[in-house]
Image (cartoon, rainbow, N blue to C red):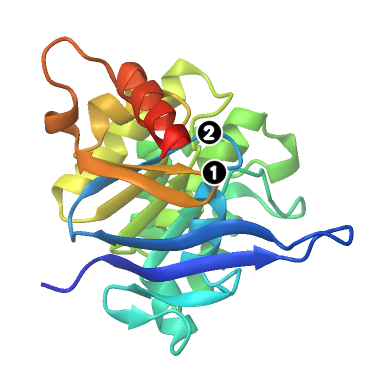
C-alpha cells in the first residue's frame, strides 16, 4: 500500500549565523504515514516539526533525502504533490482586501476549481463562518482568521490534511467545531497530520504519534500501545524525551 506521506532519510541544514557549524534542523528522518491515519507529530519547540511540514509542502528543500505525498515526489512533481495537501500553518497569513468567501473562491481557483461554492458553504458552516462569509478578512478576530485558514486548506478536498498547531490561542468553541469537522473528514478517508502542544488533543484524536527532538525521530508508536494503564500522553511525552536525552 502506498503511504500517504513518506519521508526517507530527510535532513535539513541551515548555514550558521557565525563561523560555527551549520544548524541541523532535521537529522535523517525516516517516517511513513498510512492512508487514512490520524497521525500526531509531537516534540518541544525547535524539534523540527514545522520544518518537516514545510518540506512536505515544498516550501523548504531538504539537504538530503526524499519526500512523497500519496506516492508523488515533492521534488520531482511539486505541483501535483501540493494538490494532495491541505496545510493549515501556525502563522495568521491573509489578504486584507477580500471577504471570507472571496478568499475561499480565490483559493479554489488556485486548484482549478471554478464552481466550488457548495463545498465552500459546507466548510463555512462546519467552521462557524457562515455569518462572516461577506465580512472583510481584516475585520475578523484572530480566532476567526484561523478558521478561514482551516477552510482554505480544505477548499480543494485534499487527501492529506496537515494542521500545524491549529488551535493555539483559540477559543474552546473553535477547538470543538474544528475537531468535529476534521474527525468527520478522517472518517471519510482523509489522512490527518497534526502538530500540537495540547497533548490531550494528541491523546484523544491521534491513532499513532511520532516524537521529534532536536531534529531526530526518537520514537513512533500507536497511541493505544503508549497509553497503557493510567498513563497519560503528558507522561509518555516526558519519558520519551528524557530517554532520548541520554541515548
Q: Is residue 115 among what the camera can see?
A: no
The answer to whether marks 2 and 1 mark residues whose Cβ atoms lie closer than 8 Å is yes
In this view, the residue farthest toward the front is 246
Q: Name the secondary structure under disc 1.
A: loop
Q: Residue at x 45, y 90 (%)?
A: 76
Quadrant in the rendering for residue 84: bottom left
Quadrant in the rendering for residue 86: bottom left
In the rendered image, residue 127, in percent from the top left (x then y), is placed at 41, 36
**Residue beneath label 2, please?**
44
Q: Residue at x 25, y 55 (%)?
A: 191
- Nearest to the observer: residue 16 or residue 94: 16
Q: Name the secondary structure under disc 2.
A: loop
In the rendered image, residue 45, in percent from the top left (x then y), is placed at 59, 36
Badge number at residue 47: 1
Q: Quadrant of the C terminus?
A: top left
In this view, the residue farthest toward the right is 18
As drawn, is 186 to the left or to the right of 75?
left
- Nearest to the observer: residue 9 or residue 118: 9
In the rendered image, residue 98, in percent from the top left (x then y), is placed at 70, 54
Residue 103's place in the image compared with 75, above or below, is above
Q: Residue at x 37, y 44 (%)?
A: 218
- Nearest to the observer: residue 244 or residue 167: 244
Amino acid at each position: 500500500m502506498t503511504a500517504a506521506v513518506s519521508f526517507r532519510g530527510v535532513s535539513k541544514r541551515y548555514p550558521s549565523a557565525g563561523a560555527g557549524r551549520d544548524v541541523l534542523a532535521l537529522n535523517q528522518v525516516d517516517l511513513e504515514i498510512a492512508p487514512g491515519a490520524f497521525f500526531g507529530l509531537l516534540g518541544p519547540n525547535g524539534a523540527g516539526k514545522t520544518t518537516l511540514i514545510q518540506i512536505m509542502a515544498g516550501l523548504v528543500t531538504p539537504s538530503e533525502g526524499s519526500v512523497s505525498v500519496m506516492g508523488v515526489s515533492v521534488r520531482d512533481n511539486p505541483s501535483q504533490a501540493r494538490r494532495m495537501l491541505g496545510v493549515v500553518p501556525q502563522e495568521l497569513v491573509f489578504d486584507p482586501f477580500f471577504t471570507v468567501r472571496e478568499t475561499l473562491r480565490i483559493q479554489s481557483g488556485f486548484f482549478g476549481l471554478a464552481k466550488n461554492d457548495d463545498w465552500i458553504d459546507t466548510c463555512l458552516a462546519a467552521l462557524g463562518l457562515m455569518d462572516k462569509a461577506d465580512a472583510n478578512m481584516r475585520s475578523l478576530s484572530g480566532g476567526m482568521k484561523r478558521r478561514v485558514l482551516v477552510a482554505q486548506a480544505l477548499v480543494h478536498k485534499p487527501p492529506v490534511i496537515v494542521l500545524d498547531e491549529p488551535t493555539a490561542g483559540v477559543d474552546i468553541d473553535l477547538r470543538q467545531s474544528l475537531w468535529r469537522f476534521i474527525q468527520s473528514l478522517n472518517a471519510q478517508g482523509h489522512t490527518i497530520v497534526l502538530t500540537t502542544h495540547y497533548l490531550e488533543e494528541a491523546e484523544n484524536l491521534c491513532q499513532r504519534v511520532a516524537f521529534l527532538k532536536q531534529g531526530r525521530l526518537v520514537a513512533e508508536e500507536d497511541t493505544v500501545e503508549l497509553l497503557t494503564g493510567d498513563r497519560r500522553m503528558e507522561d509518555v511525552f516526558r519519558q520519551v524525551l528524557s530517554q532520548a536525552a541520554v541515548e
